[in-house]
Image (spheres, grey):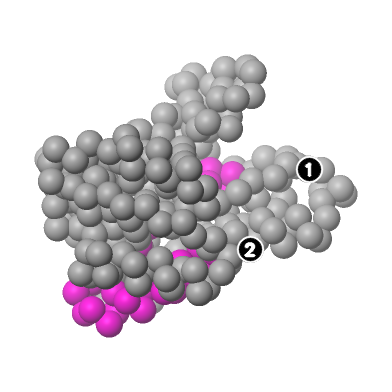
């Protein structure tokens, strides 16, 4: 059984979708969770949905991961409330679709600033805290199946997530000496609110997958909880992939 009672976890992008599912799953398994994100109303909704019957706690913190000072404040807030940090799920991200010849530098910079630089800044602050504490820990970042099997009209997004994949492998190699485990969540087509809102999109996406179904965020939440638990003490440098077979189709 997955047990997270001894874990203090920050989850970014927790206002909806995968991040919300991760935060709620971890809290339901007894973890103390800081649900962080840009949308304050969405964070409040996440907190209101939490099942804390196993002794977990959940708090929310509004953060813009493009701002280093905001990230530092997020971790200060978490450590003050929970005493220490054990784990971070750097899930916040944005997507934009446009033909390459129409992609502007401003839009490229926006995607990279959130998905790659924001993830770097989140993990950099977290790693420094974990190293100082001296008790190891776990870092997970959300990549994408599009970094493994690319899609058209998403050059900035694909590049940003490819960068996340490469960075996480480098961190797994470098931070292992501190007993810090580093893994990458690799979602495929997932039934998040923005995709549910597009008429027919999920049905069309499912039709080309080997399993003929898209992934639900809750399934990814379970996988992340497992990877953060003490059941996986030697899992590092791994791709945590649930994608209904997208990357092999």
Secondary structure at numbered mark 2: helix
Q: Main secondary structure of the magenta part?
A: helix
Percent coordinates x, y for residue 164 in the rendering: 53, 60
Q: Residue at point 59% right, 44% down?
A: 146
Q: In terms of sequence position, does the residue under pointer 2 or pointer 1 come before the other?
A: 1
Residue 200 can be seen, yes or no: yes
Determine which quarter of the picture holds residue 90. bottom left
Magenta stretch in the rendered image: 118-147
Percent coordinates x, y for residue 187 in the rendering: 47, 41
Percent coordinates x, y for residue 247 in the rendering: 52, 38
Q: Is residue 224 left or right of residue 187?
A: left
Total residue callouts: 2
Percent coordinates x, y for residue 86 in the rendering: 25, 65
Residue 176 can be seen, yes or no: no
The residue under label 1 is: 98
Residue 217 bears which disc, if any? Answer: none
Q: Residue at point 49% right, 60% down?
A: 63
- Quadrant (top left/top right/bottom left/bottom right) for the N terminus: top left
Determine which quarter of the picture holds residue 9. bottom left
Q: Is residue 229 left or right of residue 113?
A: left
Identity of the residue furthest to the bottom in this view: 132
Q: Nearer the viewer, residue 161 or 45?
A: 45
Q: Depth-wise, is mark 2 or mark 1 nearer the camera?
A: 2
Q: Nearer the viewer, residue 115 or 101?
A: 115
Residue 113 bears which disc, if any? Answer: 2
Q: Quick one: label 2, few (<14), some, or many (20+) residues within 10 Å?
A: many
Say if the magenta span includes residue 124: yes
Q: Is residue 16 left or right of residue 172?
A: right
Q: Residue at point 81% right, 43% down?
A: 99
Is 211 drawn above or below residue 49 in the view shown?
above
């Amino acid at each position: 059984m997955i047990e997270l009672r001894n874990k203090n976890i920050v989850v970014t992008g927790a206002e909806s979708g995968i991040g919300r599912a991760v935060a709620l799953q971890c809290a339901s398994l007894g973890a103390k969770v800081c649900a962080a994100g840009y949308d304050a109303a969405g964070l409040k909704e996440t907190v209101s949905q939490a099942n804390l019957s196993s002794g977990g706690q959940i708090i929310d913190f509004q953060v813009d991961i493009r701002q280093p000072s905001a990230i530092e404040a997020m971790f200060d807030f978490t450590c003050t409330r929970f005493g220490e940090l054990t784990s971070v799920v750097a899930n916040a991200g944005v997507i934009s679709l446009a033909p390459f010849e129409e992609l502007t530098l401003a839009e490229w910079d926006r995607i990279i600033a959130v998905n790659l630089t924001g993830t770097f800044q989140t993990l950099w602050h977290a790693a420094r805290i974990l190293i100082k504490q001296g008790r190891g820990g776990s870092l997970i970042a959300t990549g994408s199946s599009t970094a493994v099997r690319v899609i058209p009209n998403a050059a900035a997004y694909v590049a940003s997530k490819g960068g996340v994949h490469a960075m996480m492998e480098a961190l797994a190699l470098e931070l292992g000496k501190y007993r810090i485990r580093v893994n990458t969540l690799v979602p495929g087509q997932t039934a998040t609110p923005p995709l549910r809102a597009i008429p027919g999109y999920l049905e069309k996406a499912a039709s080309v997958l080997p399993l003929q179904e898209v992934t639900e965020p809750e399934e990814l939440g379970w996988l992340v909880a497992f990877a953060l638990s003490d059941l996986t003490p030697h899992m590092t440098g791994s791709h945590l992939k649930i994608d209904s077979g997208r990357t092999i189709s």
